[in-house]
Amino acid sequence: SSGGGGSAGGATAVSVIRLTGPRSHDALRALLVKPGQSLADVKMPKNRMASLRTLWDPTSSSNVDIFNDDAEDGQRALQYKPDQLDSSLILTFAGPRSFTGEDVVEIHCHGSRAVVRGILDTLSHSTLVTAYGLRPADRGEFTQRAYGRGKLDLTEVEALADLITADTSLQRKQALRQFDGRLSRLYEGWRTELTKSLAHAEAVIDFGDDEDLDADDVDDIHNEGDGGLGVWGNVIPRVNDLTDRMNRHLSDSMRGEITRDGLRICIVGPPNAGKSSFLNLLSNRDAAIVSPVAGTTRDIVEVTLDLGGVRCMVSDTAGVREEGSTDDIIEVEGIKRARRAASEAHVIVCMVDATDIENGMTAIRDILEDANDESIPTRKNQQVVFVKNKVDLLAAAAEAGEMKLNDSSLGNETFEISCETNNGIDSLINSLTETVVSRVSSGEDANGSLEVEEEGAVITRARHRRHVEAAADALGRFSTLSGQGYMALDMAAEELRLAASELGRITGAIDVEDVLDVLFSDFCIGK
């Protein structure tokens, strides 16, 4: 059942109850038997055409058993007086032209708890369970049956899960691109190329010089390092080209995973710089406590926002100080968590008090040094935005002689804002939105090469990346072994087989039972 009328939700206008399996149409027929009618007299809706029908409860007519109705006994049908369940829109699908590949029924009923519960209770009644073998579906079982019957491959199942949980427009678009099969076609295309190359290797291994290879495999191509034996024909150039394509696919700055999982933004700065005030302005609500007392925020306060269609997790952190400048154990722990949040962020917003820039930059110096250290894996492609807050206090601070200005450590582009007057806030939010959108948009990859996506296919899960990396590594080893002639032929062929196997695991063609158990458990009931 889908919709708010189920046990966990409130009332909605419409709920959908789905049945799948070889007897699903028969179970629907039992709900369509009108008073004074028999099962044999029911006219079923046409497949794939919506039909408005009245549903009846066959279990409520205690003195008549329609499932054992004798067609010659007209009195039995006349005595049948069931209770009405609902007036619903009915859709039927005949397998294999259905989502699951089986016969499917969709009951679009009114969404009140009474209606939904009445229909579900009727379908769960022992009479219908015995007659048609009905039972409640497990989580994700409809999709699991679709996968089992070849209606979806594993990447398409994952795309469907992403589409169901999509929060932003970019997540929706990415899930739909993957659901239409383009990622599957990319990986299966690569796997097919490797299979052809492997067939060549196995032919040479099994038959040697007696094997009549295809013309494509015996072109006179000189391969450096193979001793002039020409063992691999033109397989090496094809595999090298495929390796390059895999490496370009991997050099995508993790755009697909960030779009799916969300981009992390961390606001850091010294105590009382206005970080919590900025978070509240971003989220348009009082997400964090704001007070003039320095060090109000002691823990991570996180809100989820949609910036330009990108799901962003924005973290407000405890004010950071130079190491050893405080003995407060709670504040020390808060600073540790702030540094950890900054290390995991894709974008760091460094905020300082405009009237005390020098001390502010000193406090976050270690965070900035780490952000510029590309040897730290989590810091690669990390972006830093500099913000001077409280510019509305500059004039008063200058008159009082309390200005501490040293802009030399700030970045080239620094935003001047006031969370009190909202001055510069729109400009900062617009720039931050452009930053996060560019982080997940196609274009130049980390190496400066253009457009790493093939037909819009991007890596969306760590599982995909792990298998593509393993396949690329195997092809790298093949490149070395293939230059050693017949002596290494078996080992080189095994690397091709390993690479093809890794790609097959992405789409579910090979050994994915452990992945399926986790994936289908994340689906809702009825999907």
Image (cartoon, rainbow, N blue to C red):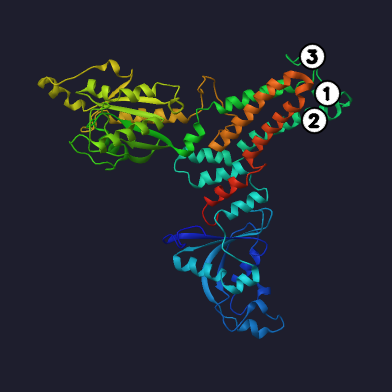
Q: Nearer the viewer, residue 238 or 283?
A: 238
Q: Position of residue 195 (x, y in %)?
A: 73, 32
Q: Are marks 2 and 1 in contact (CB under 8 Å)?
A: no
Which amino acid type corresponds to the residue marked 1 in the rendered image?
Answer: Ala
Place residue 268 in its image quadrant.
top left
Crowding at mark 1 (Cα within 10 Å: few <14, some 14-19, many 20+): few
Please name the amino acid that badge 2 sits on: Glu
- Residue 514, given in percent of the width and then of the height, sits at 60, 46
* Front label number (3 vs 1): 3
Quickly name the residue at label 2: 202
The answer to which image quadrant residue 50 occupies is: bottom right
Q: Which residue is mark 3?
A: 228
Q: Residue at x 67, y 58 (%)?
A: 94
| SS assignment at label 2 | helix
User: Sequence-wise, which precedes: disc 3 or disc 1?
Assistant: 1
Whether residue 507 is visible here, answered yes or no, is yes
Residue 460 appears in view = no
Q: Amino acid at mark 3?
A: Gly
**Left or right position of 374 against 252:** left
Quick check: 377 above or below 306? above
Q: Which residue is mark 1?
A: 215
- Considering every residue shown, the one lying at the far bottom of the view is 75
Sequence-wise, which precedes: disc 2 or disc 1? 2
Q: Give the alpha-carbon distance from disc 3 to disc 2, as whole Å.
A: 20 Å
